[in-house]
Image (cartoon, helix red, strand yellow):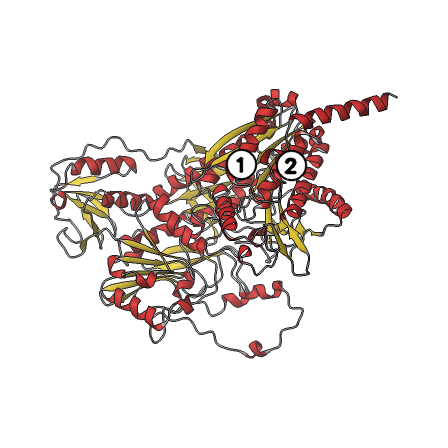
């Protein structure tokens, strides 16, 4: 009798809650899954829920996208937990110290990082409704944090496009236009960046704002909801190899626990799924790996569909996949995840505490030396990740030297940076700084090397001992007192900070010169590329000193005043070796054949990093544009350029360059520029051997094909620092290589190149891909008439995080003439 009364009471309670909270369908006025919900209506629904059940849900706006759309986080738990939410959070974070009474599970659900994987946001509404109604028991010992749309700009781009092109009500024929997005799909954010590759690098505003909130919680479980090809069954954990070696046995085990629970529901419904394939846990900047390296059970869930599916599409086997189907699958795994976390809250807290104890990694400290601007830039990234660091306190340190790949010494003085793995974020330190991540399987989903010392162009040593350190302080500049009567003002040139400073001067109409050769003046040495600002060059400029001083303060860039242009060593300031830097008018090619992600990297570089104007020229109307209006034309990487360069196009480009234009061709954009009708660049001819005529077995796997691939490996290249393209560099540069293209040295103007060693210093390169790669071009400049063609066979702007490569690009803009 008591059991019946309790059951009746629970039913009454549930019905009353359900009546007080509208479902997504009731609130929106249409059945969920019958159409795509625009972002402002998603926001409306989450705001409605927060107002309807304020005791069990809290909604915060944690930022805004580049296009101004709000970014939201919903916190939900039982009423008693929500009343103590801050106390729960503090106890949870204190668990990283090993001393805490934390008892609640913390689950973070992230939806729609790729905008055209649009089912995720729809599923988020159904999931939060269920957690607040029929599944509220899951919240008794669990805090759920939900981001309904990580990438609103991309999602709105897709939804708007779909509504423009869809049939009424919709067409399942996969050949219909509604299943074929254009060049700029909804996958990326405003600047065409893939936000699911940006968790560690934080180049995008959405990533930086989200990480601040993520660090406030450090969840036990994080799920990143995705979509894949239309014909693919659902994917959920456990993940595929390679697993990074820092991933604990429990993190592996709990993925299996979750996967088995998901499978139970999928089996019951007869839904297809797969596990342990394709999606690995290695590259650190994903929405599954980054949380994993911070102690979470990080996972990707992949539903078939993506931008091809629309509201419904016919699959390859003749079934119809609808948006409602896709919602049901993500809804099921979302609830199943919370269910399992709630059942295992004590174990999650115990293992989370253990994760943050000293892991006793081989390398206890990393000592970095080099350009102070680069160290300061790196310190900003470390601050965002809450990684502790300091400066050296003196003494010699032994360990593995990155620059020569063997054990040796370095000095840990006050000009060095020291980062220890003996800290709460020690695991993340190891992953981001280790010389070469151990790869258990070459068949991986992304790049295989990313070590930050290489990316920032710093000398590094990995020590097996803890190296003492003191507080590190970034360079600051007091209010500069510039001598108004000086002959000139001088600044060095060796970092992106210097490039930003120069761009600011040029935007403010300040004339700047550069030194092509080293010189010494007033007892101080200056390298190639050093900036020289003559008072006489700017005498007609109103408030010249005020503008220059403002730029100096803005970028903490010290200026040295001099009373003469008569140098002690080198060339005087009136020499032809001291040239005016003319502000270039820059154009960037958009549209096919440029890859949208490569295009976005250049676009973002100009607008958000260099802060210098750029004009986008789309290929749709390029033939109508007079290139004579531009000094620089940038061709981003992409497939299909060999067809883009017909005879007429090559003639147009050659004539423009001959008249003084500067063409910057990146990665695959180089292919097809050479040849009889083109420029002098030549691909390396690979000698044939009898093996190429062998019949490949039917069962040859993608794994076998990896011997021909380079999956994001780091190569040590030789540099000619006397060339303007390499001003500010030494004789060595570490390049991140993603493709297998090989180009011969130029007759003149080979600037960065591989010599005899073709084995990467970090990452995977297949045995065949390494062959015949010696003595090949990385970066070079070909003079043609009055202009130049600049070849960047590797991408120095890749994903915006290869900091040291950016100076090559700035040199291409400002130094090469």
Q: Are marks 2 and 1 in contact (CB under 8 Å)?
A: no
Q: In the rendered image of this protein, does residue 383 appear above or below residue 20?
A: below
Which of the two labelled residues, at mark 2 and mark 1, occupies the earlier sequence position?
Answer: 1
Which residue is farthest front?
168
| Quadrant assignment, res 370 | top left
Q: Quadrant of the N terminus?
A: top right
Under circle 1, the secondary element is helix
Camera-nearest residue between 575 and 460? 575
Using residue 339 as the reference point, say whether residue 772 is left or right of it. Answer: left
The span from disc 2 to disc 1 (Cα, nearest Å) is 16 Å
Tell me: 591 left or right of 813.
Answer: right
Q: Position of residue 715 (x, y in %)?
A: 45, 58
Q: What residue does disc 2 label?
A: 127
Residue 425: in sight, yes or no?
Answer: no
Q: Indicate which disc residue 314 carries.
A: none
Q: Residue at x 67, y 55 (%)?
A: 320
Query: Which of the two residues, 55 or 320, is positioned nearer the viewer here?
Result: 320
Residue 756 is left or right of residue 526, and the answer is: right
Give the x, y percent position of residue 348.
67, 33
Which of discs 2 and 1 lies nearer the camera? The answer is: 1
Q: Is residue 557 above or below residue 761?
A: above
User: Where on the picture, by quarter, is residue 3?
Assistant: top right
Q: Say which quadrant the C terminus sits in.
A: bottom left
From this viewpoint, which residue is outermost toward the right? 1
Work out whether residue 561 or residue 28 is closer to the camera in this orientation and state it. Answer: 28
Residue bearing mark 1: 41
- Which element type, helix, strand or loop, lies under badge 2? helix
Residue 42 higher or lower than 445, as above or below: above
Where does the image place residue 741, in percent across and percent down from the top left?
45, 66
Residue 755, percent across and down? Answer: 41, 65
Q: Is residue 37 above or below residue 235?
A: above
């Amino acid at each position: 009798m008591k059991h019946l009364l309790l059951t009746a009471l629970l039913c009454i309670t549930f019905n009353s809650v359900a009546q007080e909270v509208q479902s997504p369908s009731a609130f929106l006025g249409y059945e969920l899954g019958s159409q795509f919900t625009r972002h402002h209506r998603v926001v409306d629904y989450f705001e409605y829920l927060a107002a309807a059940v304020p005791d069990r849900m809290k909604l915060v706006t944690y930022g805004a996208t580049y296009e101004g759309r709000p970014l939201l986080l919903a916190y939900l738990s039982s009423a008693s937990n929500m009343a103590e939410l801050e106390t729960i959070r503090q106890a949870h974070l204190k668990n990283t110290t090993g001393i805490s009474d934390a008892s609640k599970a913390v689950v973070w659900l992230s939806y729609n990082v790729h905008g055209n994987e649009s089912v995720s946001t729809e599923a988020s509404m159904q999931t939060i409704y269920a957690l607040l109604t029929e599944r509220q028991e899951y919240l008794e010992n669990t805090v759920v944090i939900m981001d309904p749309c990580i990438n609103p700009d991309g999602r709105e781009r897709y939804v708007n496009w779909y509504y423009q092109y869809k049939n009424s009500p919709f067409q399942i024929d996969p050949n219909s236009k509604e299943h074929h997005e254009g060049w700029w799909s909804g996958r990326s954010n405003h600047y065409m960046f893939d936000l699911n590759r940006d968790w560690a690098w934080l180049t995008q505003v959405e990533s930086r704002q989200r990480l601040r909130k993520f660090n406030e919680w450090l969840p036990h479980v994080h799920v990143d909801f995705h979509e894949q090809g239309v014909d693919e069954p659902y994917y959920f954990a456990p993940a595929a190899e390679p697993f990074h070696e820092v991933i604990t046995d429990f993190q592996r085990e709990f993925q299996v626990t979750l996967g088995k629970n998901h499978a139970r529901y999928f089996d019951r419904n007869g839904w297809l799924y797969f596990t342990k394939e394709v999606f690995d846990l290695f590259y650190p900047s994903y929405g599954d790996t980054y949380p994993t390296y911070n102690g979470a059970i990080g996972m990707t869930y992949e539903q078939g569909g993506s931008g091809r599916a629309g509201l419904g599409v016919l699959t390859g086997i003749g079934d119809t996949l609808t948006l409602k189907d896709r919602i049901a699958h993500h809804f099921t795994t979302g609830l199943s995840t919370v269910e399992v976390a709630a059942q295992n809250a004590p174990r999650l807290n115990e293992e989370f505490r253990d994760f943050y104890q000293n892991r006793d990694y081989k390398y206890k400290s990393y000592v970095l030396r080099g350009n102070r601007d680069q160290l300061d830039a790196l310190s900003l990234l470390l601050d965002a990740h809450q990684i502790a660091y300091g400066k050296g306190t003196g003494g010699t340190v032994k360990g593995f030297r990155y620059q020569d790949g063997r054990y040796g010494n370095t000095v840990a003085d006050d000009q060095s940076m020291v980062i220890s793995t003996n800290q709460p974020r020690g695991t993340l330190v190891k992953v981001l700084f280790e010389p070469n991540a151990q790869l258990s399987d070459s068949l991986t989903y992304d790049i295989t090397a990313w070590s930050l010392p290489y990316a920032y162009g710093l000398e590094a040593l990995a020590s097996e001992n803890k190296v003492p350190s003191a507080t590190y302080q970034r360079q600051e500049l007091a209010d500069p007192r510039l001598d108004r009567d000086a002959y000139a003002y001088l600044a060095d040139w060796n970092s992106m900070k210097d490039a930003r400073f120069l761009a600011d001067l040029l935007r403010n109409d300040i004339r700047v010169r550069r030194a092509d050769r080293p010189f010494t003046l007033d007892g101080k040495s200056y390298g190639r590329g050093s900036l020289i600002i003559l008072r006489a060059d700017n005498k007609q400029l109103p408030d010249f000193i005020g503008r220059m001083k403002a730029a100096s303060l803005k970028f903490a860039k010290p200026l040295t005043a001099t009373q003469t242009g008569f140098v002690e060593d080198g060339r005087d300031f009136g020499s032809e070796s001291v040239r005016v830097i003319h502000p270039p008018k820059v154009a960037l090619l958009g549209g096919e054949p440029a890859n949208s992600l490569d295009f976005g990297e250049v676009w973002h570089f100009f607008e958000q990093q260099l802060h210098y104007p750029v004009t986008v020229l789309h290929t749709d109307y390029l033939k109508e544009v007079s290139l004579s209006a531009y000094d620089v034309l940038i061709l981003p990487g992409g497939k299909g350029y060999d067809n883009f360069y017909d005879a007429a196009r090559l003639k147009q480009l050659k004539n423009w360059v001959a008249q003084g234009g500067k063409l910057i061709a990146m990665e695959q954009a180089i292919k097809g520029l050479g040849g009889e009708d083109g420029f002098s660049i030549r691909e390396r001819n690979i000698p044939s051997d009898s093996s190429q005529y062998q019949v490949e077995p039917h069962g040859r796997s993608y794994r076998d094909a990896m011997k021909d691939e380079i999956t994001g490996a780091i190569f040590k290249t030789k540099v000619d620092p006397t060339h303007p393209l390499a001003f500010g560099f030494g004789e060595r540069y570490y390049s991140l290589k993603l493709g297998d293209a090989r180009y011969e040295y130029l007759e003149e103007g080979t600037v960065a190149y591989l010599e005899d060693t073709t084995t990467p210093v970090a990452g995977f390169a297949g045995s065949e891909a390494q062959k015949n790669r010696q003595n090949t071009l990385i970066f070079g400049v070909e003079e043609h008439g009055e202009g130049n063609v600049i070849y960047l066979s590797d991408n120095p702007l890749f994903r915006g995080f290869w900091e040291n490569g950016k100076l090559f690009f700035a040199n291409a803009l400002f130094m090469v003439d």
